[in-house]
């Protein structure tokens, strides 16, 4: 199947704390069609995110599609609580990079 | 007041982040019923609650507040400040109050400040623990007695009810300790009979000011107009506008679940929310609902001291060192702890490898030509942290390793002094819900006059 990097399809790819214990990843798509296609095939799964971030699946809490913004959100457990010894990103704002090159199936024309 | 409309001016995303005076002036010309501003966040981490300090500077907060307070006094409308000083505990509230006193003296103003405190004693939290009134948030670990006993400072997020009580006093400024972020924006309108779902959702967006507009900014003013059946958002700077997507996208921001946003006393349900674009860069939002919870819960935030930190910043450029860095640093950590017999932790943050993402970094095989190494030592007191950091630094600097040809030193130290004491280190100990019988119970009101 033909694939494209997620960064070509998205207008926003970001990460941020959702409180000190959770990290939340948002992808906002450029096109509603692409968003609806990926939603319809259930492309984003907890398994996919667990693999991408090298985390056990129980650390990936949920995937939520948000139609009003043509967006998908994934919330996961921070490996280290924000600001505790060993944390590397207090605001959680630079944990999105693995999503940029994620290979996404291109929709058949 | 036009009873079908409640206008709220939000000057900036965080008190102290600043705003253009022109945007603020345009906002005041629209005759808002309220100026509200959020000062708080847990995003900067546990240190600020622990140390009783603000993550914004005194000068920046004074600048913003001076403009806001002088204009609001002139227009006879209230100012509500949420989560004073960033963390909203007693030292943060007192810090903000002292800034208000400076402003009153400088501008020859005299006004009443209603102060709402949000500190909660470990005694009260232990009592709640014993009567099983504490609950974990969705995914945080269950709380233990030890977490409560070891906490050095605890605050609770207040809901709208304490702010209603403060509004009853007719004070010019309402200075809130830690509160649920939308409350300063929403509480007065709910008191006037507006729909709480719409009021809280508008507050959720206004508390970040122009971050929800496009291009976004944390330092620009926004006007929210609440009506009976929806609310409108409008940028007060021509260079920005609200769009359907910018507004909807903000609903995702920093939230675990964009459809259900839990807060004190209830949950904001956005399942049926509609976002519509209007002319003039405005957006109309409708359909948001507030679903009350029983029993009423408030969120607690507590921190404890985890030690003292000293760091050393260095770079490495030698390929033989770089390709063995993991093994070298592992052996140093063991040696240093053994040599000194100090209980503590040594952490190496290696930028260029996984300094940003740690264990979650997927790119494990790339080898950069240079790296930054931050040596971090944490121990029970400053002296031990300094000792661990110094010993780790000198050991890495001069250690031998297979294939070494650069025998004068392994690190490019960035500074003299090379080691930087960072002071106390705190960690979150409590981030849980507490059931309360009375939403006012833990948020005492204090009235004070400021100005000559």
Image: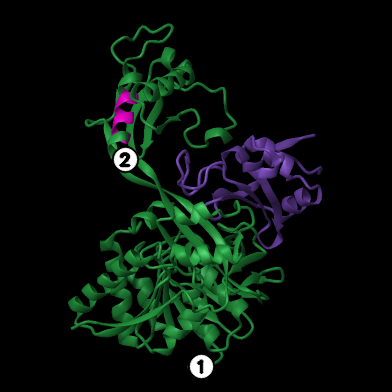
Chain colours: A purple, B green
CA–CA distance between discs 1 and 2? 60 Å
Q: In this view, does B327 lie to the left or right of B232?
A: left
Q: Quadrant of the C terminus of chain B?
A: bottom left
- Work out whether residue B276 can be spotted: no
Q: Relative to B37, does residue B422 appear above or below in the rendering?
A: above
Pointer 1: what residue?
Answer: B2
Instruction: Specify whether disc 1 shares its chain with disc 2.
Output: yes
Q: Where is residue B57 in the image (x, y as percent from the top left)?
A: 29, 59
Secondary structure type for disc 2: loop
Q: Is residue B46 left or right of residue B142?
A: left
- Work out whether residue A51 can be spotted: yes
Chain for mark 2?
B
Query: At x 68% / y 63%, what residue is drawn?
Result: A68
Secondary structure type for disc 1: loop
Give the mark nearest the N terminus, 1 or 2.
1
Query: At x 71% / y 60%, what residue is drawn?
Result: A67
Q: Report which quarter residue B257 is drawn in.
A: bottom right
Q: In this view, does B294 lie to the left or right of B14?
A: right
Q: Relative to B392, does residue A56 appear above or below in the rendering?
A: below
| Residue B387 is one of the magenta-drawn residues | yes
- Of residues B309 and B352, the one drawn nearer to the viewer in this rendering: B309
For the stretch drawn in magenta, the main secondary structure is helix
Query: At x 29% / y 27%, what residue is drawn?
Result: B390
Q: Position of residue B79 (x, y in %)?
A: 38, 79
Query: At x 60% / y 60%, what residue is drawn?
Result: B249
Pointer 2: what residue?
Answer: B381
Magenta stretch, residue numbers = B385-393
Q: Position of residue B35 (x, y in %)?
A: 41, 78
Q: Relative to B318, does residue B287 appear above or below in the rendering?
A: below
């Amino acid at each position: 199947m033909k694939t494209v990097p997620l960064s070509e399809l998205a207008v926003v790819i970001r990460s941020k704390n959702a409180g000190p214990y959770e990290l939340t990843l948002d992808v906002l798509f450029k096109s509603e069609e692409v968003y609806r296609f990926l939603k319809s095939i259930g492309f984003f799964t907890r398994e996919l995110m667990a693999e991408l971030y090298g985390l056990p699946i129980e650390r990936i809490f949920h995937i939520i599609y948000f139609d009003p913004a043509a967006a998908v959100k994934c919330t996961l457990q921070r490996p280290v609580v924000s600001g505790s010894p060993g944390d590397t990103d207090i605001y959680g704002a630079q944990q999105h990079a693995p999503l940029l090159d994620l290979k996404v199936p291109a929709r058949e024309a | 007041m036009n009873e079908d409309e409640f206008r709220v001016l939000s000057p900036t995303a965080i008190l102290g982040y600043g705003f253009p005076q022109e945007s603020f002036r345009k906002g005041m010309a629209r005759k808002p019923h309220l100026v509200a501003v959020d000062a708080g966040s847990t995003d900067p981490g546990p240190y600020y609650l622990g140390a009783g300090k603000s993550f914004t500077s005194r000068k920046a907060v004074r600048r913003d507040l001076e403009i806001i307070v002088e204009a609001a006094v002139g227009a006879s409308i209230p100012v509500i400040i949420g989560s004073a000083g960033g963390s909203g505990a007693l030292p943060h509230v007192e810090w903000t109050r002292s800034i208000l006193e400076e402003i009153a003296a400088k501008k020859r103003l005299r006004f009443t400040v209603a102060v709402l405190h949000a500190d909660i004693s470990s005694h009260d939290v232990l009592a709640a623990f014993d009567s099983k009134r504490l609950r974990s948030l969705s995914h945080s670990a269950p709380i233990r007695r030890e977490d409560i006993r070891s906490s050095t400072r605890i605050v609770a997020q207040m809901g709208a009810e304490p702010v209603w009580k403060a509004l009853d006093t007719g004070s010019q400024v309402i200075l809130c300790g830690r509160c649920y972020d939308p409350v300063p924006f929403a509480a007065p309108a709910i008191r006037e009979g507006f729909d709480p779902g719409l009021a809280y959702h508008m507050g959720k967006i206004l508390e970040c000011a122009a971050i929800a507009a496009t291009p976004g900014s944390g330092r620009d003013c926004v006007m929210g107009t609440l009506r009976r059946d929806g609310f409108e958002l409008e940028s007060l700077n021509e260079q920005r506008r609200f769009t359907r997507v910018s507004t909807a996208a903000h609903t995702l921001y920093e939230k675990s679940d964009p459809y259900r946003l839990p807060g004190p006393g209830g949950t904001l349900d956005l399942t049926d929310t509609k976002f519509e674009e209007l002319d003039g860069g405005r957006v109309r939002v409708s359909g948001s609902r507030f679903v009350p919870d029983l029993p009423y819960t408030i969120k607690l935030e507590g921190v404890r001291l985890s030690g003292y930190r000293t760091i050393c910043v260095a770079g490495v450029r030698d390929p033989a060192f770089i390709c063995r860095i993991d093994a070298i640093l592992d052996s140093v950590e063991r040696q240093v702890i053994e040599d000194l017999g100090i209980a503590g932790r040594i952490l190496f943050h290696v930028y260029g490898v996984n300094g940003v993402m740690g264990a979650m970094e997927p790119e494990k095989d790339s080898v950069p030509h240079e790296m930054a190494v931050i040596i971090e030592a944490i121990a029970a007191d400053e002296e031990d942290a300094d000792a661990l950091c110094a010993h780790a630094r000198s050991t890495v600097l001069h250690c031998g390793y297979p294939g070494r040809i650069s025998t004068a030193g392994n690190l490019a130290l960035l500074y003299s002094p090379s080691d930087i004491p960072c002071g106390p280190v705190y960690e979150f100990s409590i981030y849980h819900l507490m059931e309360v019988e009375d939403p006012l119970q833990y948020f005492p009101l204090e009235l004070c006059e400021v100005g000559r």
